[in-house]
Every structure is written in C-alpha cells, then in structure tokens.
Image (cartoon, rainbow, N blue to C red):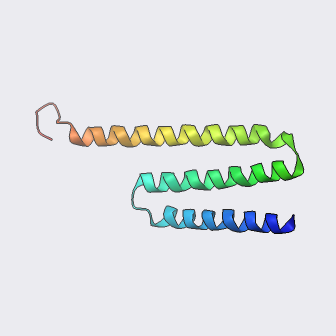
Amino acid sequence: MIYLWIAIAVLLGAGSLLSMARLVIGPTILDRSLSVDVLLASAIAGIGAYAAFHRDPTVLPILLTMSVLGFVGSVSISRFVARRQLGRTEPNEEGTP
C-alpha cells in the first residue's frame, strides 16, 4: 500500500511541477489558465485518492466545490478572452479597426 501512495505522490507531484513551469513560462493568459486547471485537477486527484484509500466520505463536498470552482473559473476566463479578442477584430464606430 505504501508503494502505491509513493507512486501517486510522484505522479501528481511531477504533473504539478510541470504545470507550475507552464504557469511561469506561458506567455498567454490561456496557458496560465490551463496550468491552474491542471494544478486544481492534481489537487482534486490527490484528495480523491486520500478519500478512496481511507474510505472517508467527508471530503466529497470539498471535491465537489473544487470541481465547480475549476469549471466556473475556466468558463469565465474563456469568455473574458473571447470578448477581448472580439473587441480587437471588430471595427469601431468609424469603420476603422
């Protein structure tokens, strides 16, 4: 059982480190948003593994809340970027871009 915990920790840690690198390096807001989503998914997977191994259902509301927050954050950032790009490509009232 301890070897499984070590494997889970190594894999989730590696994914989190790569995501942190993407967060620092990523030039656009979409790159950074994706890396924050991966970090949140890693946290959810870690908490879910804890709940599964210890048979602890008390963390399920936390998992639900984190997943909803991740979804709402992703949708709001994508809407923000879409509106920002729409504003750049549409001509203004005088007809010039």
Task: Name the quadrant of the C terminus.
Answer: top left
Is 55 in front, or is 24? 55
Number of marks in the rendered image? 0
Image x and y of residue 6, in percent: 78, 68
Q: Residue drawn 15% across and 30% down?
A: 93
Residue 62's image quarter? Answer: top right
Q: Residue drawn 56% across and 66% down?
A: 18
Residue 67's image quarter? Answer: top right
Image x and y of residue 84, in percent: 33, 41
Q: Residue drawn 87% across and 64% down?
A: 1
Image x and y of residue 30, in percent: 43, 51
Q: Residue drawn 58% across and 54% down?
A: 38
Among all residues in the image, which is located at the extreme top?
93
Image x and y of residue 94, in percent: 11, 33
Left or right, 70 with respect to 5, comes to: left
Is 92 in front, or is 67? 67
Is 2 in front, or is 32? 2
Vertical arrangement, residue 48 with respect to residue 60, above or below: below
Left or right, 81 with respect to 11, comes to: left
Left or right, 20 with respect to 96, comes to: right
Residue 3's image quarter? Answer: bottom right
